[in-house]
Amino acid sequence: MPTQKRTHPTGAPAPPRRRMSPEDRKEAIVSAAVELFAESGFDGSTRDVARGAGITQPLLYRYFPSKESLIEAVYARVFLKSWEPEWDEILQDRAVPVRDRFQQFYTAYTEAIFQPVWMRLWHFASLRDAEVYGWYREVVQEQILKPLVRERRIELGRNSGFQVTPAELEAPWLLHGGLLNYGLRQQVSGPAAPGDRAAMIDQALEMYMLFTASQAADDTSEDPS
């Protein structure tokens, strides 16, 4: 008996299925995971991820042996790949005052991350996935907050060589966390008016600059030498 050709409901021949390369398949799985986790948090199941990617759960596990490895791939896609290499150059350019550097950086950074998927995943991680949030926190401290502390020390004529302490990171975390929470509020209430985000960044940096200047003055007045 001859083999029948597959057809669409209209009767037209169905187009041949395109075989995906392993790399494309892996990317499709990560995309499905990003979409699911942004909607339901990291509690979303691998079964639902597989369904979203149009594959079986056993096939998913051929690419990601565990849910944890899939979450790591989502983290890398959303949180690490959103970092632009030129931002490092902006933060390190000592020909520009620290405040102006970080104003330029946070303008670009918030433009990139104030997106629904990024903000929802960050919110879910901060509330319900300590490991993912810990990864994010470490990257922020190393790439943004510690450089801010060190560059501000140099600008204030203080010793830049000693290690950044947890106490020194509290103020920049307030700055950074405040901007992220502002972005989260915008996701709920709708886009801010033009200029509001720039004003918020300016205000947050002004508070940090005033605080560190006051702290440096206090340290100088207590120096017995």
Image: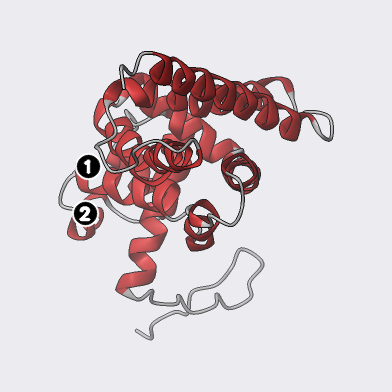
Q: Residue furthest right?
A: 194
Q: Nearer the viewer, residue 42 or 109?
A: 109
Q: Is residue 47 above or below residue 55?
A: above
User: At x 35% / y 76%, what residue is drawn?
Assistant: 21
Q: Residue furthest front?
A: 225
On the image, which quarter does residue 198 sit in? top right
Per the image, the residue denoted by label 2 is 64
Q: Is residue 23 visible?
A: yes
Q: Residue furthest bottom?
A: 2
Quarter holding the C terminus is top left
Q: Residue 47 at what x, y percent from top left?
A: 29, 41
Identify the coloring: secondary structure
Q: Are marks 1 and 2 in contact (CB under 8 Å)?
A: yes
Q: Which mark is residue 188?
A: none
- Left or right? Give the position of 53 relative to 95: left
Q: Is residue 15 above or below residue 167?
A: below
Q: Nearer the viewer, residue 64 or 158?
A: 158
Quarter holding the N terminus is bottom left
Per the image, the residue denoted by label 1 is 67
User: At x 48% / y 62%, what residue is drawn?
Assistant: 85
Mark 1: amino acid? Lys
Q: Residue 34 at what x, y percent from top left?
A: 43, 45
User: At x 36% / y 47%, what residue is drawn?
Assistant: 74
Q: Nearer the viewer, residue 56 or 170?
A: 170
Disc 2 is placed on an element classified as loop
Q: Residue 190 at what x, y percent from top left?
A: 74, 26
User: At x 21% / y 54%, what residue is drawn?
Assistant: 64
Neighbour class for label 1 at 10 Å: few (<14), some, many (≥20)? some
Q: Is residue 52 visible?
A: no
Mark 1 and mark 2: Cα distance apart in space: 7 Å
Disc 1 is placed on an element classified as helix
